[in-house]
């Protein structure tokens, strides 16, 4: 089919690569404008643009789409059968939605109508979901509310972070888009109305990254750490420094006591220990910290102005004592 592809990050690049390798005619690739980053303000291309350059595809990078007659006329001249939209980062105006013969098709990393919005992968983990998936749908003028074409459900691993799930779903989404286009081309693609209650997955805010030891239990803390890895990282203040916590393991108090039998006679006192307090330091495993309902073992850590590292490596270069506290 004759396709216009819209997308930006590596999640989108996997879909672009999949439909290119399948032999579809990619007449145009539309991605966001280049950005300058870092101290040297080096211009960074999106992963989609990098792949399009490699394959010598025609690239457009409009600042906006709405009321942009130049890009609208360009798309009309292409006469696409389908516009594929994958993590593009812009809302498509109705004038563009009406251009392609078979409509605009989106790859969305959740099982719609659950988690409409910009951060469905992160919120699935933040909320402790056991499953998620990918949906392909026809775009309309509401956010992620179009008719569903196909869905694919997957389990979320207990220790999987949002970066790992992002990578896994990007491959699944690419395969699902190829399957979707096959059905669209044969005019056999279903159109399933989204019914029932929907939920929103809004953009992540920096304010949510600080661990609330007093109010959050061990599983909630673990989900926060997983959900914000690698986007921004959950953090606590430790000895006056902002300290990011990248990976943890949870333990019930009885599990901790079974592992370190010297604590058995003091287990009844655990309820009096303030959440965030260090219970034990194992130089080979990490730092055990009391939560309001259990214990977490910090496995990876990053203190302010330092690099991310395993907790045993951190312990070799930093003085940490029992009863020190994460706040």
Image (cartoon, helix red, strand yellow):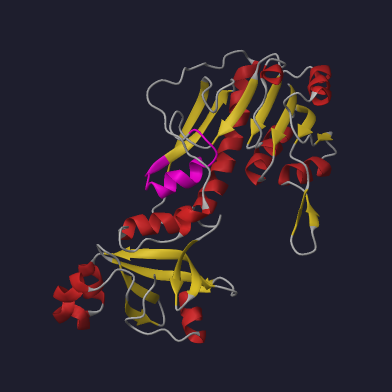
Q: Viewed as shown, does residue 148 lie left or right of 249?
A: right
Is residue 78 positioned above or below 168 on the image? above
Q: How far across and how far down the image is residue 44, in percent?
A: 77, 52
Residue 160 in view here: no
22, 119: nearer the viewer: 119
Give yes or no for residue 243 being in the magenta stretch. no
Q: In which quarter of the image is residue 95?
A: top right
The residue under the point 65% across, 30% down is 85
Q: Which residues fall within the magenta stretch?
A: 116-131
Q: Where is residue 96 in the image (x, y as percent from the top left)?
A: 71, 20
Quarter holding the C terminus is bottom left
Q: In this view, does 242 lie above or below 227?
A: below
| Count of numbered circles in the view | 0
> Left or right: where does residue 278 sit relative to residue 64?
left
Q: In this view, does 151 lie above or below 35?
A: above
The quadrant in which the N terminus is found is: top right
Please state if 48 lies on the left or on the right of 249 as rendered. right
The quarter holding residue 283 reads: bottom left
Which residue occupies 53% across, 21% down? Answer: 146
Do we see residue 279 in this rendering?
Answer: yes
Residue 321 higher or lower than 101, as above or below: below
């Amino acid at each position: 089919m004759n396709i216009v592809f819209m997308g930006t990050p590596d999640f989108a690049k996997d879909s672009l690569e999949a439909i290119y390798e399948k032999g579809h005619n990619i007449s145009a690739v539309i991605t966001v404008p280049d950005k300058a980053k870092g101290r040297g303000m080096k211009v960074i291309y999106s992963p989609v643009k990098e792949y399009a350059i490699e394959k010598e595809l025609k690239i457009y990078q409009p600042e906006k789409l709405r009321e942009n007659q130049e890009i609208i006329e360009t798309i009309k001249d292409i006469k696409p059968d389908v516009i594929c939209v994958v993590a593009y980062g812009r809302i498509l105006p109705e004038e563009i939605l009406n251009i392609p013969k078979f409509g605009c098709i989106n790859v969305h990393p959740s099982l719609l109508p659950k988690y409409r919005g910009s951060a469905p992968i992160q919120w699935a983990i933040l909320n402790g979901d056991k499953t998620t998936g990918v949906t392909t749908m026809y775009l309309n003028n509401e956010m992620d509310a179009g008719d569903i074409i196909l869905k694919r459900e997957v389990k979320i691993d207990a220790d999987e972070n949002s970066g790992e799930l992002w990578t896994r779903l990007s491959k699944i989404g690419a395969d699902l888009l190829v399957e979707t286009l096959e059905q669209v081309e044969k005019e056999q693609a279903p159109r399933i109305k989204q019914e029932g209650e929907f939920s929103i997955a809004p953009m992540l805010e920096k304010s949510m990254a600080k661990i609330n030891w007093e109010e959050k239990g061990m599983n909630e803390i673990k989900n926060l750490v997983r959900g914000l890895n690698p986007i921004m990282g959950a953090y606590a203040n430790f000895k006056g420094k902002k300290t990011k916590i990248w990976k943890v393991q949870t333990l019930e108090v009885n599990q901790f006591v079974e592992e370190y039998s010297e604590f058995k006679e003091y287990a009844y006192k655990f309820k009096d220990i303030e959440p965030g307090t260090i219970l034990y330091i194992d130089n080979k495993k990490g730092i055990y910290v009391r939560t309001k309902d259990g214990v977490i073992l910090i496995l990876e850590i990053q203190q302010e102005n330092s690099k991310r590292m395993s907790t045993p490596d951190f312990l070799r270069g930093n003085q940490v004592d029992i009863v020190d506290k994460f706040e």
